[in-house]
C-alpha cells in the first residue's frame, strides 16, 4: 500500500510538470533600471531550475550571458521568429510560488510586444516550446532525485544486511565456542564425580580406622 501511494505521488509530480500551463502573455519588466516590453511565461518550476533550463535553451540561439537571473543574447539566431539576428533580454523571477520568465525580443529597432503581430505569435510559440522542454528537463531532474534516494536507501539496507550477517557469524562462532566449553565442562564434571566418589571412600576408610570408645 505504501509503495502504491509513493508511486501515485511520484506520478503526480511528473504529471504536474508535463501539464505545465503554457500561459504566455504580453507584459513589461524593469531590468537593470530599464523598462522593457515583451512576453511573460508562468511556470510552476522553481526559478533556480527554470533559469538553468532557460540558459541552456538560449545557448542554441547564440552566445548567452547570465547574471543574477538575467539572461541576454546580443545576436540571437531564431529562424522561426526572424531571418535576421535579434537581441534577447530576459529575466527569471519568482513571486507567490509562481516562477515567471520574461523575454524582451528586439528585432531591428523595435521590440516584439504587439500580440496581433505574427512575430509576436512566433515568439509566443518559442516560449511555449521552451515550456515543454523545461517540463521534460524537470521530469528528468525529479527522476534523478528519486533514483538517488532509492540508491541511498538500497546502500543503507545493504550495509545493514552486511552488519547483520557479520553479527550472525560472530554469534555462530561464539555458540561453537560455548558448545566446546560445555563439552569440556561435561568431561570435567564426570571426572569430578569419580574423584568425589574416591574421596568419599577414602573418608569412610579413614573413619573406620578410628577406634570406637
Image: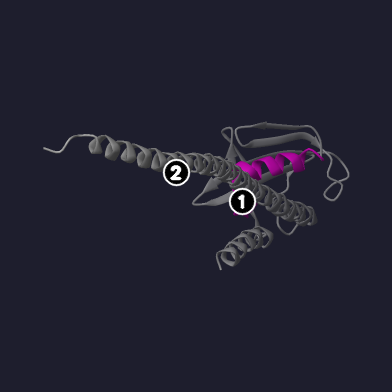
Q: Earlier in the sequence, mark 1 or mark 2?
A: 1
Q: Give the residue pinned by disc 2.
A: 190
Q: Quadrant of residue 15?
A: bottom right
Residue 175 spot, x, y in % from top left: 52, 44
Residue 36 spot, x, y in % from top left: 63, 42
Cα–Cα span, label 1 and label 2: 81 Å
Seen at 83% across and 44% down, the residue is 78
Q: Give the residue pinned by disc 1.
A: 45
Q: Mark 2 packing: few (<14 Cα in 10 Å), some, or many (20+)?
A: few
Residue 200 spot, x, y in % from top left: 31, 40
Seen at 75% across and 52% down, the residue is 133
Locate residue 50 relative to residue 205 in the image: left or right. Answer: right
Magenta part of the protein: which range?
A: 40-60
Residue 98 inside the magenta-drawn segment: no
Q: Quadrant of residue 49?
A: top right
Locate residue 204 relative to residue 57 in the image: left or right. Answer: left
Residue 161 versus residue 32: which sits nearer the camera? Answer: 161
In the picture, the quarter occupied by the N terminus is bottom right
Residue 43 inside the magenta-drawn segment: yes
Amino acid at each position: 500500500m505504501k509503495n502504491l501511494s509513493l508511486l501515485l505521488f511520484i506520478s503526480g509530480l511528473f504529471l504536474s510538470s508535463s501539464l505545465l500551463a503554457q500561459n504566455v502573455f504580453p507584459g513589461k519588466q524593469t531590468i537593470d533600471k530599464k523598462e522593457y516590453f515583451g512576453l511573460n511565461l508562468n511556470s510552476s518550476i522553481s526559478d533556480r531550475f527554470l533559469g538553468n533550463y532557460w540558459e541552456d535553451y538560449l545557448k542554441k540561439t547564440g552566445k548567452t550571458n547570465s547574471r543574477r537571473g538575467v539572461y541576454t543574447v546580443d545576436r540571437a539566431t531564431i529562424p522561426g521568429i526572424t531571418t535576421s539576428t535579434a537581441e534577447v533580454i530576459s529575466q527569471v523571477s519568482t513571486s507567490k510560488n509562481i516562477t515567471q520568465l520574461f523575454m524582451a525580443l528586439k528585432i531591428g529597432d523595435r521590440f516584439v510586444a504587439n500580440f496581433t503581430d505574427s512575430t509576436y505569435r512566433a515568439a509566443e510559440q518559442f516560449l511555449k516550446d521552451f515550456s515543454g522542454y523545461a517540463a521534460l528537463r524537470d521530469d528528468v531532474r525529479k527522476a534523478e532525485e528519486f533514483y538517488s534516494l532509492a540508491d541511498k536507501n538500497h546502500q543503507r539496507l545493504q550495509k545493514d544486511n552486511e552488519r547483520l550477517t557479520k553479527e550472525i557469524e560472530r554469534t555462530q562462532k561464539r555458540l561453537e565456542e560455548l558448545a566446546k566449553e560445555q563439552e569440556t565442562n561435561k568431561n570435567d564434571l564426570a571426572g569430578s564425580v569419580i574423584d568425589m566418589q574416591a574421596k568419599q571412600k577414602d573418608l569412610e576408610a579413614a573413619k573406620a580406622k578410628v577406634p570406637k570408645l
